[in-house]
Image: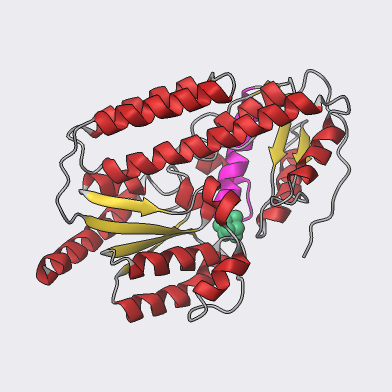
Amino acid sequence: MPVTRTVQAPLPRDAKISFPQFASYGIAMEHLVQRGLDMAFVMPPRMTRRTLEVGARYSPDSVCAPFKLNLGCFLECIELGADTLIQTGGTCRLGYYGELHEQILRDLGKDIRFVNFAACDFSNPKTFVDEFRQLKPDLNLKRFTAAAIQAVRMVNAIDEVDALIRRRIGFVGDPSLLDHIHGRWLEQLRHADGLKQIEQLRRSTIRTIEALPIDMPRHPIRVGIVGEFFTVMDPFSNHEIERELGRMGVLVERWMDISNCLYHYRGRKMLPRIKGYAHYDMGATAMGTIDAALRYAKAGFDGIIHVKSAGCTPEIDAIPALQNISADYRIPILYLSYDTQTSEAGLQTRLEAFYDMISMRKEAQQ
Ligand code: SF4
């Protein structure tokens, strides 16, 4: 069902804009707001248990965890001085969350402006430009376009560096070295000025990571992570599952990131590839989940982990297809569903049991 487009009122010059935290992508949003709109941005604080608890306290119980986390994050951004909150919408019920978030914040007495991009079309950047024009009628299109291109390039670079770290973190002697490089990379990227500097930083960071000695077995245990886009990409939401697997010495692959969603997520192209397992687009990123799982199964991965938020209908729909892939390719799949009550210890036990099972199986097969 299409989301109704609302007319956005122009923002005052001194608006303090914020956007809920999502992995490390806030850096790109900050760049777009500061450089493209010439307005102030309030960087959302790192999400913590408090963010989740505050968000859950004021959310309907049945909504998915991303709703609660976003709400908690909005409240923390308001505490830091934000007066204008951006909600982008999405391809599931996330498209309707903006109105609900706004209403809850108003009921809590928060005097904020809410900018909702739910009606924009992610495959058509012009729809975003039109919305930004309403927010800032004197928008300098040249400046805004340059900042938008740089922001997209930042996202691509963040994804590229993250993917490299994912593949190596299980095999470097001291993983904290990678954490240090990652932290420094994001801090430098945050202050990057222009495409050339973004590219220089990307290259030098990749060189630094590749220069760290690694000790990887000839046939490492390989696990593909698939699932719901927010939970799978956001380390806080998935309790840093990739780091945990790395600690166990697992080579982790994950196709789902913003760059792949932007450039390669075409449900119509995926359907023929997965036609033995799904005939219709089930919404959100469920097709990407099935497509990636099938690819990992065909590539002989040792296991797949399906990550989703509790109550996420598109990913619940994907589970029967994953079960069929698991049976056809004899590949184990661990299903993890996260909610506000997910316990660290319970998760750890399940991960360790899965690791023991796939490593024993690999040993027996060799
Ligand atoms: S994809 Fe699922 S978990 Fe994510 S926002 Fe949509 S319904 Fe919620």
Residue at 80% from the left image edge and 35% from the top image edge: 132
User: Residue 77: x percent and y percent?
Assistant: 62, 29
Above or below, 8 against 180 in this view is below
Residue at 74% from the left image edge and 33% from the top image edge: 110
Frontmost residue, 67 versus 171: 171
Frontmost residue, 142 versus 52: 142
Frontmost residue, 366 versus 137: 366
Q: Is residue 325 left or right of residue 345?
A: right
User: Residue 134: x percent and y percent?
Assistant: 87, 35
Above or below, 350 against 329 in this view is above
Residue at 60% from the left image edge and 61% from the top image edge: 266
Quarter the N terminus occupies? bottom right
The part of the chain drawn in magenta is 57-80
Quarter the C terminus occupies? bottom left
Q: Is residue 47 visible?
A: no
User: Residue 113: x percent and y percent?
Assistant: 79, 33
Q: Quadrant of residue 3?
A: bottom right
Q: Is residue 159 visible?
A: yes
Q: Is residue 9 left or right of residue 178?
A: right
Frontmost residue, 317 versus 258: 258
201 in the magenta segment: no
Q: Is residue 113 left or right of residue 74?
A: right
Q: Main secondary structure of the magenta part?
A: helix
Classify the position of ligand 1 by quadrant: top left, top right, bottom left or bottom right.
bottom right
Residue at 48% from the left image edge and 53% from the top image edge: 256
79 in the magenta segment: yes
